[in-house]
Each structure stands twice: as structure tokens, then as C-alpha cells.
Amino acid sequence: MATVSITHVGEDVDNAFGLAMERADCTGIIRSGDRVLIKPNWNGCSIAASTKLVTVLAACRWACSQGAGEVIVGEGPVPVGRPRIDAYLAEMGALEALSRVGARFVLFDDDEHVIVANRDDLPREIGIAKLALTCDVLINIPMLKVHSCCLTTLCVKNLKGCLRPADKMAFHRIGLLPAVVAMNRLIPAHINLVDAMDAMEGNHNNGPLVPLGVYIAGRDRVATDAVASAAIGFESGTVPLLKMAANAGLGECDLDKIDIAGEPLTPQRLQRSQDHLRRNYPDLNIQEAGACSACSAALMDGLYTAGSARTVKSVALGPQVNPGSDALVIGNCTRKHWSSHDHVSGCPPDGAAIAKALQKDKADTHD
Ligand code: SF4
């Protein structure tokens, strides 16, 4: 049974980090002299939406205490341009702070990538940060945030930062969720910790912060994400990315099969990106009746990928919806309308398929 720990973080962050590791059975993974890579979520966009520096420093000190011979913090931020990334790191004070604890920062964009090509489940060619594939131990440390396309963005999604900048949008084009899962099959994540001292609701880069004051940690990335998702109100089995990752053999997503150590799980529903779908797309007529949040998330992924190429002005989703005549109907539970409407199948449908349908100006998906 996978074990995931929930640990209160007080003033002594180092102590909380060590306790989270001990409770999650992560001590003893690092061997003497190991090269350890810490992968935070340092996105280059917003420090508030990033793994806290104090958490990363605690991870560095803990790795050294476990016998690491070298500690590297590596990240490939959102491609916002080098000046903005440099300013973000400078404002955080990351490089100086890391050097004080004997660690160094590597911007993956400047470092070597291993080319992976011609796989069915990934874009034709991608580059993965070589450090992520060659380190002895990878410590994966995202922040707890909701996400418009994945519902939550945690350990599984955090490894997308190991991609070359040019490859990131390609993931949306072929289907973000299956591509993220496929990439996770290539990258080990030996130790996983979700920094939930603060969680971000509403939007994954500029939403309000909700103090939760805990670390959620485990060896199993999927189980760790399942517990962290449950902590903000996503019940077991309701996050499609985690179900897909579990089906791919990456870990356990069923809360009934996860042993929670330390503090009890006390779910607190945070605002989701999907709660603001209509506000974010005012020119789109969204008819929704009884739709799951997974379908709304897939729609948001499709809308993001389609961008300004979208031609469809009306969509309908959910089992009880009564779609207007011009609506694109989304999801298997709208099946009874497929003979009369353009549709996208799936439960939930794939964001890339929705994006494609949103760019059509002529019906061609009728049964
Ligand atoms: S298609 Fe599936 S995920 Fe989407 S609303 Fe219907 S039941 Fe929910």
C-alpha cells in the first residue's frame, strides 16, 4: 500500500520537511555521494505561484543530511523570455540562497536535453532535461494549485518543466493529459512533496492564496497527488490526469488504497478555474447541466489550444443539457444529441479533440 504523509509546517521548516520524509518512508533513498536533483515549480511567472524558497532550501539541507554528494535545483520555466526569468530568480533571491546551502541552480533551457523521438504517445520529437534522466535521485516539489486543464497541478504535472521550451505547446496539440502521462513514464520521481504551506485557488498562476500549512509527501507521485487533490476538494478518482497515470502503472490514485500518515486529511474545497469558465470566455455561449469538472477542464484545455482560431460560438455539456441548435455538444453523456449536433466523444473528452472541433465552421462530426 502506498503511504503519503501529511505534516503540519510550523516555524521550523527543516523539521517539518524531515518529518514529512520520515513519515512517508523516504529516508534511506539517498545514498552517500548521490547526485540529487530537486525539481520545484519555479515557473518564471509569479513567485506567489511557485514552490516556496524556504521549502526548496529545506529540501537541499535534508538531501545533504542524507549523504548527497551534489545537490542541484533544476527548472525549465514557462517560456516567458530570459529577462523575465532572470528578474524572477533575482527577486526570489534563489541563486544566492542556494549557494549558501551548497546547492546550485540549473536552468534546463541552457542545459543538455535528451531527444526522444517517434513515440506514439508523444509529439514527434521532444527534449527532456538530461539532468532529470541521469541524476541518482529526483526530488519533485510542486506547489499545491488548481489548474484549468488538469484540475490540479502537482507532482505528475510538475515534470512537464523538464521539457524543452519549444515542446510545451506541442503537448496541448496532441492532448495534454496523455502526453504528460507518457512523459512521466520516462522520468523517475523518487521522492515527491507537495508544498501546501499556501495553496493557490482560482487560477494556477495568479489566483488567491489559501494557507493550508502542510506538506504532503510520498514515494508514489500519483498517490501523493491524489491526497493533495483530495485536500482541496477533489474526491478520489475525479481527477482524470491521475486516473490516466494510475492506469499507466505510475502509482495509486484510489484513496482507499493509500495509507495516510501524520495529520488527518481534512478536505477544504478551493475555487477552481472551471468556476470562472464563463467569465474567462464571455463571447462563448456555454450551456451546462450536470457536467463533471473533468469535462469543464477538458473544455478549458480545448479553448486554450484553439485560441483565436476558434470558430464555434456555442457549446453544451453535461447529461441534462438541452443544447441550442448551433451548439457543439461535448462528452459521451450528450450522446442522445449527436445525431443532430456536432459533437466530441469521450468521458471526459480529450482537450485536443475539443480544440479541433472548436475550430470547425462546418459540421462534419455527426453520426
Ligand atoms: S462526458 Fe463524462 S466527464 Fe463529461 S460530463 Fe458527461 S459524465 Fe461527466
Image: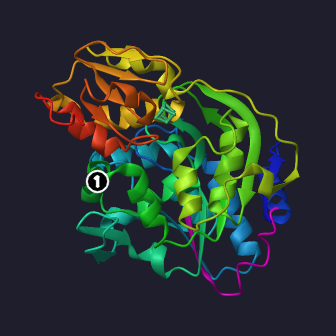
Is 191 on the left or on the right of 340, as rendered? right
Query: On the image, which quarter does residue 282 sit in?
Result: top left
Name the residue located 78 percent from the left edge and 79 percent from the top edge. 28
Q: Main secondary structure of the magenta part?
A: loop
Residue for point 26% across, 54% down = 170
Some atom of ligand 1 lies within 8 Å of the CB belonging to the residue at label 1: no
Magenta-span inclusion, residue 1 = no
Q: Nearer the viewer, residue 128 or 131?
A: 128
Q: How is the image coloured?
A: rainbow
Q: Position of residue 299 (x, y in %)?
A: 37, 32
Task: Name the residue: 70% across, 71% down.
Answer: 63
Which residues fall within the magenta stretch? 24-38
**Residue bearing the label numbered 1:** 174
Secondary structure at numbered mark 1: helix
Q: Quadrant of the C terminus?
A: top left
Q: Is residue 190 above or below residue 275?
A: below
Spot occupied by residue 16 in the image (x, y as percentages of width and height):
82, 53
Asked if the magenta segment contains residue 33, the reply would be yes
